Image (cartoon, helix red, strand yellow):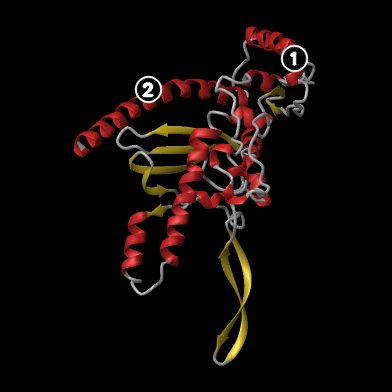
Amino acid sequence: MYDQANAIDEEEEKEYRLLELKYEKLYSEVYAKRKAINNGTCEIDAGLVAAFDKRMAVRSADEKYAGIEVDICDVNNIQNTTKGVSGFWLRAMLGQKSIARTIVEKDRPILQFLQDIRLELHEHDSGFTLFFEFEPNSYFSDTVLIKKYHMSSNNVIEKCEGQEIKWNPGSDPTKMKKKKKQKKGGKKTNVTVVVKCDSFFNFFETVNADDHDEHDHDHDDEDEDHEHGFGEKIDLDFELGQSFKDDLIPLALEYYLGVIEQESDEEDPYGDEQDDDDKPQPKKPAKGGPDAGAVAKGGNPANPECKQQ
């Protein structure tokens, strides 16, 4: 019976993966339209704008939308025209709490050049790849940064594969210079060393389970702290990748507008005694939320009078 149950589980996982692949291709067509609107490379259909205005007129009369406040949307000057959405992905990332925690102040001007985040599901395994597309900029020479997750089965991660970013001199936010005292010839001298520091761009490091195994082989006498440290690192890396895959990419517009209710960062007064089922859960609107075309136009889902100047 155990073997039969496992065989059914494997078949179910294969069928589910095929459905994922099928529908992700359909979603990618919608995301491509969102990219074109955000980057100002397409015209917005007049019928879509009219439908949005009509929908907002109805919603503005509904009391449950009265308390929602959204700032006026910014626009880019592209070829002397007001098209595109300025800082769309940076603002969306800052709106998603788990991702926002990884972004420090010096990351923000770099992420202003982010034009799109794209997802590709693997057909050869259960993993996925994230593509971060940037405008040409003065910080690094790459225009696409890639993070791959290799998975042997659902939620079984084998490797988080990043890439080495080709930073321009003095532009790497993941490194900083620090003064350090060093003994040499019986005398202490001050030397300048380069140390790692917090930055979102540490996300593009590679975390490899094979490297961990080899390291453990050479450190058999160490305590369990190293193992826990690595396990926590790969878990956090995978969770962040999942946040992009399952949350930010499909709900980027909603995070940009700030209309998703999320759990508070404040400590739970009941601690661990409160049952997980009783805790408030984040509320996410359906993927067919507010139209991206309305954002590019300068529309406000809470205020139909908020339009592009």
Q: Nearer the viewer, residue 96 or 122?
A: 96
Disc 2 marks which residue? 22
From the viewer's perspective, tell me whether residue 214 is left or right of residue 309: left
Amino acid carrying mark 1 in the image: Asp
Specify the quadrant that holds the C terminus.
top right
Specify the quadrant that holds the N terminus.
top left
Figure check: 142 above or below 309: below
- Expressed as whole percent of the image width and height from the top left, the position of residue 225 reads 45, 66
* Crowdedness near tag 2: few (<14), some (14–19) or many (≥20) residues, C-alpha within 10 Å: few
Q: Residue at x 44, y 61 (%)?
A: 228
Q: Are marks 1 and 2 in contact (CB under 8 Å)?
A: no
- Expressed as whole percent of the image width and height from the top left, the position of residue 251 reads 57, 29
Q: Residue at x 41, y 62 (%)?
A: 227
Compare marks 1 and 2 and give the one earlier in the sequence: 2
Residue 83, by quadrant, is top right
Q: Nearer the viewer, residue 295 or 238?
A: 238
Q: Residue at x 73, y 27 (%)?
A: 73
Residue 178, by quadrant, is bottom right
Q: Residue at x 35, y 42 (%)?
A: 151
Label ID, residue 285? none
From the viewer's perspective, tell me whether residue 47 is left or right of residue 155: right
- Expressed as whole percent of the image width and height from the top left, the position of residue 158 reads 35, 48
* Crowdedness near tag 1: few (<14), some (14–19) or many (≥20) residues, C-alpha within 10 Å: few
Find the distance from the CA under tag 1 to the CA under tag 2.
37 Å
- Expressed as whole percent of the image width and height from the top left, the position of residue 301 reads 71, 20
Q: Nearer the viewer, residue 98 or 293?
A: 98
Count of numbered marks: 2
User: Is residue 128 shown to the viewer in this render?
Assistant: yes
Disc 1 marks which residue? 62
From the viewer's perspective, tell me whether residue 197 is left or right of residue 238: right
Q: Say which of marks 1 and 2 sits in front.
A: 1
Amino acid carrying mark 2 in the image: Lys
